[in-house]
Image: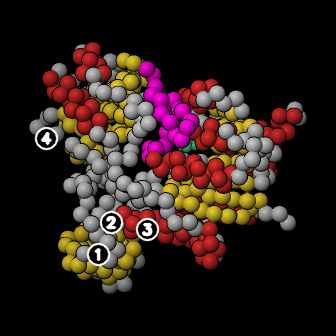
Amino acid sequence: MKKNEIVTVKIEDIGTAGEGIGRAEGMTLFIKDALPGDVVTAVVMKLKKTYGYARLLEILTPSPHRVIPKCLESRRCGGCQIQALAYEEQLLFKQSLVRNHLIRIGGFPADEVQKWMQPVIGMENPYHYRNKAQFPIGTDKDGNPVAGFYAGRTHTIIPIEKCYLGVSCNEEILDILLSFMRENDIRPYDEETGRGLVRHVLIRYGFTTKEIMVCIVINGETIPGQELLVEKLSAVSGMTSISVNINRKRTNVILGDTVKTIWGSDYIIDYIGDVKYRISPHSFYQVNPVQTVKLYQTALEYAGLTGNETVWDLYCGIGTISLFLAKKARMVYGVEIVPQAVADAKNNAKMNGINNAKFFVGKAEEVLPDFYDKRTVGEEEADMLHPDVIVVDPPRKGCEESLLSTMLEMSPERIVYVSCDSATLARDLKYLRAGGYEVRSVQPVDQFCHTVHTECVVGIQRKHI
Ligand code: SAH
């Protein structure tokens, strides 16, 4: 096989980035936008020893699971990778992705994994589920400001009028911002030169309360003539908080450290189940509120609380899971690295009249081991040293080994692992198993429909010897 050769491939599988995988001439080829069941022609772009990448040319025979994506830009946009796959098939794909990681990375026997794996909990209507959108602002070829999404793996902005994952107020807000920029000659930020003002706009929407937050990320201190912009944005039905975020760094991190509220409240309120949460621009909040209830309910069920338990909730964000658990536990201790999120968590507890949750700022892998090593002997500390349940909900990179080893020393009866990356989940479960724990149940929940991302809740139990 050579570069630029045109090959015919039957697609057998999906890769972790959503690309189709098939074999030709003894080589494994990764082909973006091809789906299992498709027979395609593709041109070879890049070759390694046993595998390579090819660009899709033509679908000769479409997969029986291929559907017409709602979004016309789904191939160019980096947001959805598998919109052309029928939704039920997306769920099966996610199920097998998790299963394979547990077997290959976790080293668990296939028949055991089969016993724990629950079918993925999907959505009835898998569109318009995102309560948060971050649009980059750039310039089109005629010099007009545009908002949209980055094309897959690049920083080229595709202007997108309508995103099927987002909520409808996004379009109205983008319209107002872009017209204001055009009329007042406010320049979008240019990544190449580091010049221009408006970098991103962050929009959050409370599904239950219908409150809207807009945060405009700028490479400066203020937006010239911003009163006019505020006047227009504040007229959008549900608008609750308008702020600017100052980010003057040459970086692709979206938010800078400073947020200034320029109209309304510093935060919006939303509910998950009957717990009320306050959300600021910097705080982490699950993006799919419909599925989050199912996710947290599963976590609660796996925690097996009766009202007497001491629980640690590590990576607690604004205390979302902590407060859900606090209603059924004796005491919950949350740990989170972002100070603002911890401030929100404390406020959220107060706002819900919850007195049995305490929060600590810091890295889970430092706070917990430090605390455990000190072993102060008060009555409360004794309970904290040996909790009944530990919940973890780390970012994609999973938990540090130093944290997992302290968790083992604390020897809780149950561990609940909420994961957004099944590869690191499998790695961490392997460690916990070696330390005397067994997996009882794995429940994937489709939080990110049409993308390759998969969320899981795992119930883990201490082995009694
Ligand atoms: N459980 C929360 C948040 C989960 S997201 C919820 O469901 O809403 C992961 C959280 O971990 C984020 O809030 C992030 O700020 C935090 N985080 C990242 N690294 C961390 C670390 N090393 N220690 C503690 N928290 C961390």
What residue type is disc 2 on?
Leu
Q: Amino acid at mark 3?
A: Phe
Q: CA distance from mark 3 to mark 1?
A: 14 Å
Q: Kindly check if marks 3 and 1 are in contact, taking CB atoms under 8 A apart as contact.
A: no
Mark 4: few, some, or many residues within 10 Å (few <14, many ≥20)? few
Which residue matches tag 4? 141
Which residue is at the front of the view, 144 or 206?
206
Tell me the residue that label 2 is attached to.
85
Q: Secondary structure at mark 1?
A: loop
Q: Compared with residue 237, is residue 161 higher up or lower down, i.e. above or below?
A: below
Instruction: Report the residue marked by disc 3.
Output: 93
What is the C-alpha distance between the residues marked 1 and 4?
37 Å
Which of disc 3 and disc 4 is earlier in sequence?
3
- Percent of width and height locating residue 67: 27, 66
* Residue 278 is one of the magenta-drawn residues: yes
Instruction: Name the foreground residue: 114 vs 49.
Output: 114
Would you name the residue on which mark 1 appears? 63
Mark 3 crowd level (few <14, some 14–19, many ≥20, 10 Å Cα): many
Badge 1: few (under 14), some or many (20 or more) residues near its Cα, within 10 Å?
some
Kindly state the secondary structure of the residue where label 2 is placed: loop
Q: Nearer the viewer, mark 1 or mark 4?
A: 1
N-terminal label among 3 and 1: 1
Mark 1 or 4, nearer chain start: 1
Residue 435, visible in the rendered structure: no
The secondary element bearing badge 4 is classed as: loop
Magenta span of residues: 265-289
Q: CA distance from mark 2 to mark 3?
A: 10 Å
Whether the residues at callouts 2 and 3 have beta carbons within 8 Å, the answer is: yes
Vertical placement of residue 229 versus 308, above or below:
above
> Residue 371 in the image: x percent, y percent?
77, 38
Residue depicted at x 15% and y 23%: 183
- Residue contact between numbered discs 1 and 2, judged by CB atoms under 8 Å: yes
